[in-house]
Image (tube, helix red, strand yellow):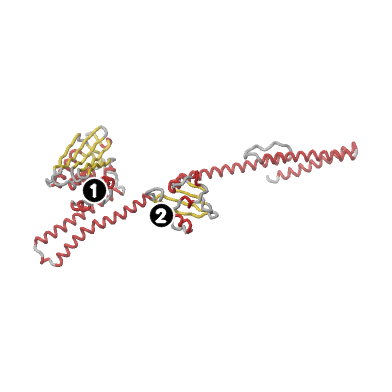
Amino acid sequence: MAIRPVRYIWAGALVTLLSLAMLGATVTLLAGLDIGLASMLVGLLVVGWHHLRCMQQLALWTRQPVGTPVPRVRGVWGFLFADLDRRAKLAYDSRERLSAALERFREASQAMPDGVLYLSEHETIEWINRKAEEHFGLDHATDLGVPVTNLVRQPEFCRYLAAGHYAEPLVLVSARRKGLTLLVQVIPFGDDQKMVVSRDITQIEKLETMRRDFVANVSHELRTPLTVVSGFLETLMDGWEDFPREDIERFIKLAHDQSTRMQRLIEDLLTLSALETGAPAPVEERVDVAGLLREVHQQAELLSAGKHEVTLEIDGGGVLLGSQKELHSAFANLASNAVRYTPPGGKIRLQWTCDAHGAEFAVEDNGIGIAPEHLPRLTERFYRVDLGRSRETGGTGLGLAIVKHILSRHQAELHIDSRLGQGSRFSVRFPKARLASE
């Protein structure tokens, strides 16, 4: 196909020359040599003018926008323009495909959960996606072409970029957004260009911190009772006969209390682990609220041992859909906490109410109360407002964390209202969908 226009050009030139020669010969025979040569010269000028005009049209067409139709001419130039037009259309289609592919790539880069920065060989910003703008506090409208180190001025980032050793990523605590931690990786490509990829690992860092704290807390919580039990046993082993029976019984009782505390802590840890690691959804049992609350009330009175006034108010009764075991655990935890943190002589009220929007279980006391700064962290594992008092009352520091997960599995919400020295109110709100007809 590529040889055809070349053949047409040579054929057209040959036909033109033959036509001029025949014209000159004919005129020479009819009118003489001078007129024949003159006619041939005129013919050459006409042909030359035609070619110059076509070349002018070609030059003007090349300056038009891509996609402008080629001029329509006859003869050899018509074939040449047709081939140029076909080639221009192929180039235009190829450019459109590349433009569409580039646009899809940019859209995909914008949709990425990670930040992406393209840097030139001089480390100026060539392109940036929305996530990178959020991570580094940049703006593509004003920051393109600006050296990245002029905008992200944290020393550790500048050193990392300049060092040239990018095998390991950089953990960068953002100076512009409080609490944001980034994992930054530089990937060299092209002619000394760089791609900077940033990932938000704030939540991962929080989880890692929680994991470290959890391990430390568990170790600490188990070490204390183990030390007590081990110390009593060693004391008795060293001189059993040297102690009166009353002391031996006291040692054994204290060791038993500490072993019970360890057992309770392990049970709570296993319960919390099952709840946090996606245990199966609770079985949809029909839980008799009145019966459940009377049982919780009785347990609270036994724990109080007559030191508090514990009352139960049930307004509306009803049936809850959920796990009897889990709901009992959540309600009993809230009631036992009220007993533990209310001084002797205090009042504790357990209350159940129903309305058109759902139901509420509340535990209210006039105990020691909680300072406002502690309220947001009460449901964290091992978080205690008063460490000494919590251990003294037998708490494991996991109760409210367990309550939070149980209530979440039942689509319920926990609300805490408390004032230091005036008491607390822990309320659980169940949606209407969790209530069944009796």
- Looking at the picture, how far across and down is residue 133, in whole percent? 45, 46
- Left or right? Give the position of 85 relative to 107: right
- Looking at the picture, how far across and down is residue 156, in whole percent? 43, 56
Q: Quadrant of the N terminus?
A: top right
Judged from the image, the secondary structure of the residue bearing numbered disc 1 is: helix
Dot 2 alpha-carbon crowd within 10 angstroms: few under 14, some 14 to 19, many 20 or more: some
Residue 407 against residue 181 in the figure, above or below: above
Residue at the limit of the structure toward the top, as seen here: 356
- Looking at the picture, how far across and down is residue 84, in whole percent? 67, 42
| Amino acid type indicated by mark 2 | Val
| Amino acid type indicated by mark 1 | Gly
* Residue at image coords 81%, 42%: 17
How many labels were placed on the picture?
2
* Residue at image coords 43%, 46%: 134
Q: Quadrant of the C terminus?
A: top left
The disc label shown at residue 168, or none? none
In this figure, which residue is indicated by the disc labeled 1? 399
Judged from the image, the secondary structure of the residue bearing numbered disc 2 is: strand
In this figure, which residue is indicated by the disc labeled 2? 171
N-terminal of the pair, mark 1 or mark 2, is: 2
* Residue at image coords 17%, 65%: 234
- Left or right? Give the position of 11 relative to 38: left
Which of 359 and 30 lies nearest the eye of the viewer? 359
- Looking at the picture, how far across and down is residue 311, in whole percent? 15, 40
Task: Give the label, 1 or 2, closer to the camera.
Answer: 2
Query: How far is the residue under mark 1 from the one under mark 2?
Result: 35 Å
Dot 1 alpha-carbon crowd within 10 angstroms: few under 14, some 14 to 19, many 20 or more: many
